[in-house]
Image (cartoon, grey):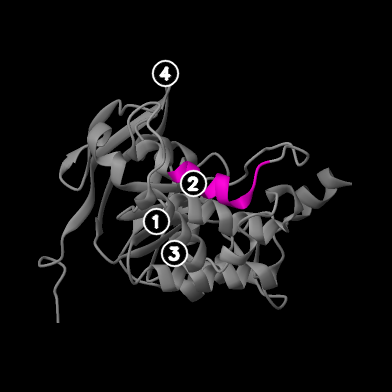
Amino acid sequence: METETQRREVIAIRNLWAGYDREQVLEDINLSVYAGDFIGLIGPNGGGKTTLIRVLLGLLPPARGEVRIMGRPVQEGRRVIGYVPQVVEFDREFPISVWDVARMGRLGQRRLLQRYTAEDDALVAEALRQVELYDLRRRPIGELSGGQRQRVYIARALAAQPKILLLDEPTSSVDPQVSSGIYELLRQLNEQVTILLISHDMSAISTYVKTVGCLNRRLFYHGGQEITAEMLERAYQCPIDLIAHGVPHRVFAPHTQAALQEER
């Protein structure tokens, strides 16, 4: 069986500090992502999750530290990353098909103004089959459900033949049943690509990913699947209770008497 040292490190983050203007949002982040990993990161709003994505995509340079992707600087290594954003704004009346949206994933693999090739089309078709939407390829994307549209965006990322999938809240706009289907899809895709996922859905994170971490300016990551009370308290910086009302689970901060009076 492969040990961690024998597996290839596909993302290396060393002593990373990053932020905006004079405010540092990420502080001394260290993380090794290995080929075949499926890592889920949770954390409070404003904790730096989106900032970390921007750094990995080369949209925000580090203030300090180093990030390498497949052993290369971010500006080169980001070519092997497929990115699925949280929300894609679009005009539902705009006449663009599922096929055309998925084929956008090939734009970064071609020269400017170069026509799509038969190879491009074959890769797009395979990506749509992987997300089980090939039969809907000619349908306008505005006619699809939220879960189906999210699968199209995953297909768009897959069309680029990435070695790493980076997803930002991929199920934030869909119901729990659809969410489970998307996570099952990601688990299958993980057989081919490495996945780094950001989510607030703790039940899904703990169920589907291989390892989990908490990010709130600093990263709390131990390479295991369990979400421990210690991790959550260190990340959220307050005592919290996990209260399960079916699925998904929700996290509530304890309400003190003073807080209750303020709410009134």
On the image, which quarter does residue 4 sit in?
A: bottom left
Count of picture labels: 4
| Disc 4 and disc 1 in contact, CB within 8 angstroms | no
Q: Amino acid at mark 3?
A: Glu
Nearer the observer: mark 2 or 4; the answer is 2
- The reply to whether residue 182 is in sight is yes
In the image, 134: left or right of 165? Answer: right
Q: What kind of residue is marked 1?
A: Leu
| Separation of residues labelled 4 and 1 (CA atoms) | 43 Å
Disc 3 target residue: 230
Nearest to the observer: residue 21 or residue 184: 184
Secondary structure, mark 3, is helix
Q: Which mark is residue 22?
A: 4
Element under label 2? helix
Q: CA distance from mark 4 to mark 3?
A: 30 Å
Residue at image location 62% in from the left, 42% down from the top: 88
Describe residue 236's horizontal placement relative to residue 263 as left or right: left
The local secondary structure at tag 1 comes to helix
Circle nearer the N terminus (2, 3):
2
Q: Position of residue 248 (x, y in %)?
A: 66, 70
Residue 49 visible in this rendered orientation of the protein = no
Q: Give the CA separation, mark 2 to mark 3.
A: 44 Å
Residue tagged 1: 123
Q: Earlier in the sequence, mark 4 or mark 3?
A: 4
